Image: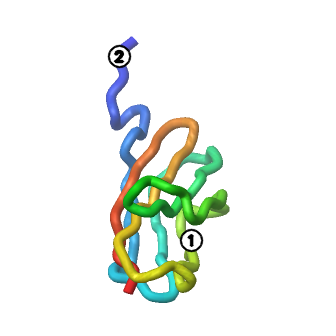
Amino acid sequence: VVSTAKSMNLNPKLHVFPNPASEYIQLEYEGGQEPVTCSILDMQGRPLIRRVLDSANERVGVQHLPDGTYLVRLRSAAYSTTRLFLKK
């Protein structure tokens, strides 16, 4: 069996905006039908926010986070992808 990243959807398109953010980040991604978990991590990899996304276009509140650089990670049974964003 030969598989490729595209056929397994290992790195789906993920858009995070606005960047920098102050109140929220909007997440838009291409994913399958399986549940997707969103985690907001600090730069040491510690999870600060974790939730299951209901759709491929969701808003996550970040107003309570201190200003800084963070990671947003999406994970499902089929893939994991991570992006940076700034909180100001």
User: In the rendered view of the protein, which quadrant contains the N terminus?
Assistant: top left
Quadrant that contains the C terminus: bottom left
Which residue is identified by label 2? Answer: 2
Q: Nearer the viewer, mark 1 or mark 2?
A: 1
Tell me: 30 left or right of 19. right
Q: Which amino acid does label 1 sit on?
A: Glu
> SS of the residue at dot 1?
strand
Q: Do the residues labelled 1 and 2 touch (CB within 8 Å)?
A: no
Q: Position of residue 77 (x, y in %)?
A: 57, 37
Residue 68 percent location from the top left of the image: 36, 76
Query: Measured from the top left, where is residue 14 in percent x and y?
Result: 39, 60
30 versus 61 height, above or below: above
Residue at 41 percent across and 49 percent down: it is: 81
Q: Does dot 2 land on a helix, a strand or a loop?
A: loop
Horizontal side of 15 relative to 48 (left or right) equals left
As rendered, which of 44 and 87 lies closer to the eye?
A: 44
Residue 61 in the image, given as x and y percentages of width and height:
57, 79
Q: Which residue does the numbered mark 1 point to in the structure image?
A: 58
**Residue 19 in which image quadrant:** bottom left
Residue displayed at 54% across by 85% down: 63
Who's the residue at 56% across and 71% down the image? 58
Crowdedness of circle 2 by 10 Å Cα count: few (<14), some, many (20+)? few
Q: Distance between the residues labelled 1 and 2?
A: 34 Å
The amino acid type found where label 2 is placed reads: Val
Considering only vertical position in the picture, is 16 above or below 52?
below
| Residue that extends furthest to the top in the rendered view of this protein | 1
